[in-house]
Image (cartoon, helix red, strand yellow):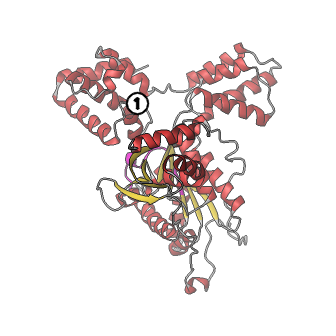
């Protein structure tokens, strides 16, 4: 019987599934698509170059065993990798990589021009009057991978962070852009990457800085006529971690200087890690040439943690602080505080404080009082799922129909309205909204939002839809 790519890959998956953890299988093997089999060569398609790097780094042995079982001892594997075009708006193209034949970026060193060695460069982190030769990393050692709890909401970002820490500047995800809402762990993850790199590569110069501080340093350098020293200092960093790059929005001068620093570091094989509260496609007032560079590597989203992850976060916090709290209280907190990690830990700290100061036992009643205060003081965040339910009910259709590919006018309008309100009322990226509403791409969501805006101005009936649904979604 002639073997097809599908049958060969299904047999391989059957073997792999029995030999790795279920979550690892779901994350790293379910997204793979078999393309073709030619003799003893199987070609598979992976979503990104990051996927290819990760499979080769962690699962090449089990892949080899699975392939040999199906295609013989001379079995070979080829990856089809979807690559973004960095220099134009053309559609992504496909590049083929043979397995175990990678050429990682060499660890190049920046050569400082002779004329720069004639004088000491001014270090923005040196306090005037105090001599300090070594650049302090500005890292918080309390933020590590060990206490960053992994879950479905953050697995890609955490895995990418570990890969970068193991081989800074030598992977496909440079820069690594981590984005997501408030309190989901962006800063924690950036610090964890830096801390891990300092432990593995103590000779590397690692620097963590917020975009706000970077901007202030640049302004000071312009005032003091030390702009060149400022640029040269940053060009000598091996690993640069910049927090909240969306803060650069509208700051043309700072964007220009960061563009040149970014280019120099990237071209010399240095690692950049950026964090943002939104995806590059959603950033406003950032120069296009800078945005295109943000997209060169990997953009990994941190989403709101699910129930299981929230339980794990609470248990980890209790373990680190030596706390023993009844399981029903832990479960109550996890079920009722869903917005972000910071609030989950905040409720736990408040509970411990109240119990200590008032000499009370931990109880469900006390927990409910604290949780109620947190919920009242926190603006309720509407989920995309909730928006889809409200819109579906309004148009008297089910959510499955709203997410389907049908082109019936009322369903299309319902879908567009769900996307519009999701963009307006949540912090989710366009890509995340599209993924949750029928697995559409970010361009579809953008088109839907523009369509709703246009119809609201020209169609009275449609404008009424928007106003009535808006009232139903208001709290």
Residue at point 72%, 47% (across, down): 142
Is residue 281 covered in magenta?
Answer: yes
Q: Which of the pair 75/195 is nearer the observer?
A: 75
- In the image: residue 449, left or right of residue 291: left
Vertical comparison of 418 with 196: above or below: above
Q: Which of the pair 205/118 is nearer the observer?
A: 205
Q: Which residue ends up furthest to the left in the rendered image? A: 458
Residue 272 spot, x, y in % from top left: 53, 60
Residue 122 spot, x, y in % from top left: 61, 73
Is residue 150 covered in magenta?
Answer: no
> In the rendered view of the protein, which quadrant contains the C terminus?
top left
Residue 360 seen in render: yes
Q: Which of the pair 375/32 is nearer the observer?
A: 32
Residue 170 spot, x, y in % from top left: 55, 63
Residue at point 60%, 60% (across, down): 167
Residue assigned mark 1: 425
Q: Magenta residues?
A: 273-286
């Amino acid at each position: 019987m002639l073997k097809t790519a599908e049958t060969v890959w299904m047999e391989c998956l059957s073997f792999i599934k029995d030999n790795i953890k279920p979550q690892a299988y779901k994350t790293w093997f379910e997204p793979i698509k078999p393309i073709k089999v030619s003799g003893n060569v199987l070609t598979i398609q992976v979503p990104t170059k990051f996927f290819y790097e990760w499979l080769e780094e962690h699962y090449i042995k089990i892949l080899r065993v699975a392939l040999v079982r199906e295609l013989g001892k001379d079995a070979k594997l080829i990856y089809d990798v979807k690559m973004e075009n960095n220099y134009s708006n053309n559609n992504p193209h496909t590049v083929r990589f043979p397995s175990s034949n990678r050429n990682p970026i060499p660890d190049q060193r920046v050569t400082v021009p002779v004329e720069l060695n004639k004088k000491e460069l001014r270090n923005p982190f040196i306090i005037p009057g105090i001599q300090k030769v070594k650049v302090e990393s500005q890292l918080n050692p309390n933020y590590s991978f060990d206490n960053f709890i992994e879950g479905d909401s953050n697995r890609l970002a955490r895995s990418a962070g570990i890969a970068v820490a193991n081989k800074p500047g030598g992977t496909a995800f440079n820069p690594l852009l981590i984005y997501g809402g408030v309190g989901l762990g962006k800063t924690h993850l950036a610090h964890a990457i830096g801390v891990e790199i300092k432990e593995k590569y103590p000779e590397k110069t690692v620097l963590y800085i917020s975009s706000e501080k970077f901007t202030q340093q640049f302004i000071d350098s312009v005032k003091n006529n030390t702009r060149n020293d400022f640029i040269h200092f940053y060009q000598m960093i091996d690993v640069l971690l910049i927090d909240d790059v969306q803060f650069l929005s509208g700051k043309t001068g700072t964007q220009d200087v960061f563009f040149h620093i970014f280019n120099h570091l990237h071209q010399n094989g240095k690692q950049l890690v950026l964090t943002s509260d939104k995806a590059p496609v959603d950033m406003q007032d950032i120069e296009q040439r800078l945005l295109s560079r943000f997209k060169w590597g990997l953009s990994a989203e941190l989403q709101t943690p699910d129930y299981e992850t929230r339980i794990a976060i609470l248990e980890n916090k209790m373990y680190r602080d030596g706390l023993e709290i009844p399981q029903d209280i832990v479960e109550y907190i996890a079920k009722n505080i869903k917005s972000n990690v910071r609030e989950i830990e905040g409720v736990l700290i408040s509970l411990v404080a109240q119990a200590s100061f008032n000499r009370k036992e931990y109880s469900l009643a006390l927990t409910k009082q604290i949780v109620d205060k947190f919920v009242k003081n926190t603006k309720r965040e509407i989920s995309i799922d909730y928006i889809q339910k409200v819109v579906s009910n309004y148009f008297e259709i089910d959510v499955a129909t709203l997410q389907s590919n049908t082109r019936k006018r009322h369903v299309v309008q319902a879908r567009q309205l769900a996307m519009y309100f999701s963009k307006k009322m949540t912090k989710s990226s366009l890509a995340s909204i599209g993924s949750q509403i029928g697995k559409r791409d970010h361009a579809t969501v953008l088109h839907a939002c523009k369509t709703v805006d246009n119809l609201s101005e020209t169609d009275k009936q449609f404008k009424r839809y928007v106003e009535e649904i808006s009232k139903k979604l208001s709290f």
